[in-house]
Amino acid sequence: MNTESNSYESRFSYLTGMFSNYYYQCCMEYHGSEEEILKEYVRELPVEVSYCTIKELDEFIALGLSKPELEKAIIEDLGSYYYPGYSMDTVQEVYAWLHWVRDTLAKYTAEKAALENPESPNKRA
């Protein structure tokens, strides 16, 4: 029995929260696009949660799982019912998608953080 995969849910609790609550079976019908899913995630949660999710996504990507391992981890262990990897031929394509999720999440998190903390060197007194 592979205890590593059984620990993904607890090891990546923020990532599990994002995948299980935002990447669900009908998410595309409700949101229209993956980008809208990530925008909503960032909008609804504190910036600190998004930063923790990004950190966990970096750690998850660094595991270097195979395509079947990624599928199992994302769907079964992290609770996502949306997995674009079914239409992807290679593990590199799945990793490219995960990097896109990470980078898009980082973009919207940085934008929200800047709005919440308007202190900047360009601000005039």
Image (tube, helix red, strand yellow):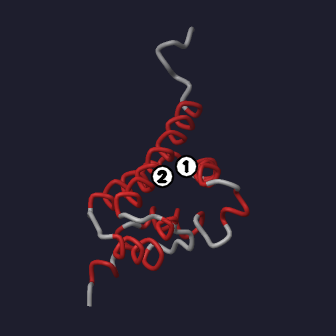
Position of residue 34 relative to residue 68, above or below, is above
Residue 74 image position (x, y, % from top left): 44, 71
Residue 61 image position (x, y, % from top left): 33, 58
Position of residue 4 relative to residue 24, above or below, is below
In the foreground, 54 or 102: 102
How packed mark 1 is, by other alpha carbons closer than 10 Å (few <14, some 14-19, many 20 or more), is few
Q: Which residue sits furthest bottom?
A: 1
Which SS class for mark 1? loop
Q: Residue at x 42, y 77 (%)?
A: 77
Q: Quadrant of residue 69?
A: bottom left
Q: Which residue is mark 1?
A: 46
In the foreground, 59 or 27: 27
Q: Quadrant of residue 93?
A: bottom left
Instruction: Mark 2 or mark 1: name the one nearer the start of the chain.
Output: 1
Q: Residue at x 34, y 81 (%)?
A: 6
Q: Is residue 39 left or right of residue 8?
A: right
Q: Which residue sits furthest right?
A: 30
Closer to viewer: mark 2 or mark 1: 2
Q: Residue at x 45, y 64 (%)?
A: 88
Q: Which residue is mark 2?
A: 101
